[in-house]
Amino acid sequence: MDFLRRQVFLFIGTSDKRGRPHTSAKPLLKIEDNYIYLVDFVVGRTYKNIKRNPKISLSAVDMNKVIGYQLYGRAEVIDKGDVFRQLSGEMNSKQVRLATERVIQGVRKSTRSLVDELISLKTVSILKIRIKEVSQIKPSGDITRDIVQ
């Protein structure tokens, strides 16, 4: 979980009603207990798939250690109410911090920032994911699996 907390994006896998897989990168909002909260700015295929089938997978790779992580769980969409407002406040704070870092990096490297695009997004939902299983894939191909209580 320490590795995951340092990530900006995680890849989420869902499937549609015909079983076709769909993978998308989503910004990580926070990890709390056995829950991972992702931000869904697009509210498209991932959103629709989770509404139909909440079983998901998440993946990330630690490029320094060449270790992959696959997490399995159930997701729910939070897009209104008190919990959504609280998480939106946390999302806005994190967004400002990340945007500030990107602007500073952009100035240092003379590259363009995506701040305007992020600020102009109108539709957003939060994906609350309850992790049930974690797999770690090592460079040797060995896989360890842990069931999360």
Image (tube, helix red, strand yellow):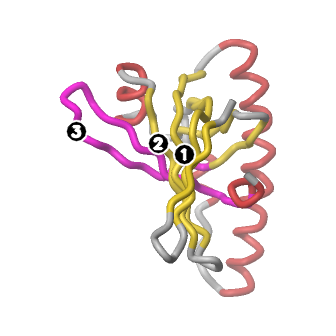
Q: Amino acid at mark 1?
A: Leu
Q: Amino acid at mark 2?
A: Ser
Pointer 3: what residue? 20
Residue that appears at 59% across and 62% down: 114
Indicate the quadrant where residue 37 lies. top right
Q: Secondary structure at mark 1?
A: strand
Label for residue 60?
Answer: none
For marks 2 and 3, the one nearer the N-term is 3
Does 130 sit above or below residue 100? Answer: above
Indicate the quadrant where residue 19 lies. top left
Q: Residues within 10 Å of mark 2 (few under 14, many from 20)?
A: many
103 horizontally vs 23: left or right = right
Pointer 2: what residue? 57
Of residues 53 and 103, the one nearer the viewer is 53
Q: Amino acid at mark 3?
A: Arg
Q: Secondary structure at mark 3?
A: loop
CB-based contact (under 8 Å), mark 1 and mark 2: yes
| Residue 97 location (% of width, % of height) | 80, 56
Q: Is residue 138 visible?
A: yes
Does 67 sit above or below residue 70? Answer: below
For marks 3 and 1, the one nearer the N-term is 3
